[in-house]
Amino acid sequence: MIPKHPATPDDDSQENDNFTSSKPEIQPDKPEEACGVFGVYAPEEDVAKLTYFGLYALQHRGQESAGIATFAGEQVHLHKEMGLVSQVFNEAILKELPGAIAVGHTRYSTTGSSRKVNAQPAVVDTRLGKLALAHNGNLVNVTQLREELLQQNCNLVTTTDSEMIALAIAQEINAGKDWLAGCIQACSRCQGAFSLVIGTPVGLIGIRDPNGIRPLVIGTLGSNPARYVLASETCALDIIGANYLRDVQPGELVWITEDSLTSQQWSQQPQRKLCIFEMIYFARPDSIMHNESLYSYRMRLGQQLAQESPADADIVIGVPDSGVPAAIGFSQASGIPYVEGLIKNRYVGRTFIQPTQSMRESGIRMKLNPLKDVLYGKRVVIVDDSIVRGTTSRKLVKTLREAGALEVHMRISSPPVTHPCFYGIDTDSQEQLIAATKSVEEITKQLEVDSLAYLSWEGMLTATREDPQSFCSACFTGDYPIPVPEPIKRTKLMFEKVAV
């Protein structure tokens, strides 16, 4: 395969450049994650195939595009396309990605439009050779960084902050710094959330921002010689048989070469602020955080919710899949039996064929189908992890009533989402967030439920069993740990998205 620079217009045919991964017309009542990152240093292993399966495990973090870059010495091999991991890669493509080092990425666009040229990894040239960068998060100082790069004649051809980070690193290296010093200096120019996996001809780099807002973990593949893996979540280690070693710490840089794994704190004042939504919703329930599965934490959220907001009902059901652990916890604490009342079609989002208008109007049935014999004549508690817009929640309540539910009591295992995120989550502007403009009583009426209750902010943090100050919960409180420029707060845009 001829290595190609992804930031050249020729990389995208007119057909591909105009192809956008369409977000569903009926948006879920969920924030969308930005992306998943994966990297592996494993001489004599099939690093492309390892990365494929790692990305497959991280597919939930981004479904718009996927890419893998591999390093065989100075030679870089790159393949990226729009679509799911299983659509972008096959055996023949993976065979064309040789090397000992690989970097992979799954993307959901938050900064930059949804088209192939914005897919990652971002590959750029430096005086030391090419680098391939995969990024999870969002910068809040992109306007300033973009102006700095343009003033120094950098060729910006994507609309992503990820490309800006890669170009900033290249700038520092071209000015005489080595790989590590170049990365550290470039990261000091970045403000916001960034968990980075960076491939180079001689090693693999992992970096986390000083607040550690997005996760990044280290795993090992054997020990003779040591082979290392970097990933957004531990579930990506499990799928390839890697062992979890530890998290990359906030403000830490790890450098993996044939000699060893070394580490240094590049930020002098790290202060952990892990996104609490990673624990509530984003990360897979089988991923490990704070020495336990997120499934266990989510069950505790449901138990806390039952204590705070009990309901007189016959059955408890969860909204598949993310609401199920909390629903089980609610059942355990309340004594109300847990049953499956909704069946999820897990493949509905994997087709590019648009439904008919009548199908769109039915909306929720495309994804969730009720078990009528389970729901008929019952007072139902339905547990979900969050409500953002309220649109599909209302459709879901209607579906339950049409299936014969006598009463519908909705319980949410997180507080009301009242503020947008600027650190790598695709949320609406504040006026579009239902809890930002309506009281719980007003939302209850809009959703047409018999009762509605959210978990308290204090209960959510207590259930972590960790220091409450070590989490970012700005979407619930508006207390942003990294200052957000007012123009960005007003527009909820990092910069104008390119019309495609």
Image (cartoon, rainbow, N blue to C red):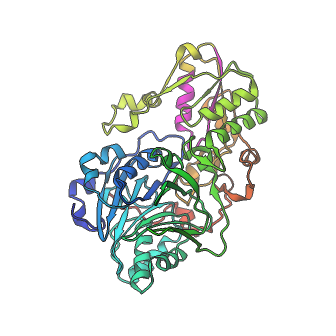
Q: Is residue 394 magenta?
A: yes
Q: Is residue 485 magenta?
A: no
Position in image of residue 47 (x %, y %): 37, 55
Residue found 50% across the figure and 45% down from its top: 238
State which region is magenta.
Answer: 378-400
Q: Which sits in the foreground, 43 or 392?
A: 43
Q: Which sits in the foreground, 217 or 194?
A: 217
Task: Give the quarter of the figure containing the C terminus.
Answer: bottom left
175 left or right of 356 in image: right
Position in image of residue 255 (x %, y %): 50, 69
Task: Give the quarter of the figure containing the N terminus.
Answer: bottom left
Position in image of residue 169 (x %, y %): 44, 76
Q: Is residue 84 visible?
A: no
The relative height of residue 357 versus residue 10 in the rendered view (above or below) is above
470 left or right of 194 in image: right
Q: Residue furthest right?
A: 307
- Kindly indicate the quadrant of the structure image that contains residue 153: bottom left
Residue found 57% across the figure and 15% down from its top: 374
The relative height of residue 207 versus residue 115 in the rendered view (above or below) is below
Q: Is residue 159 visible?
A: yes
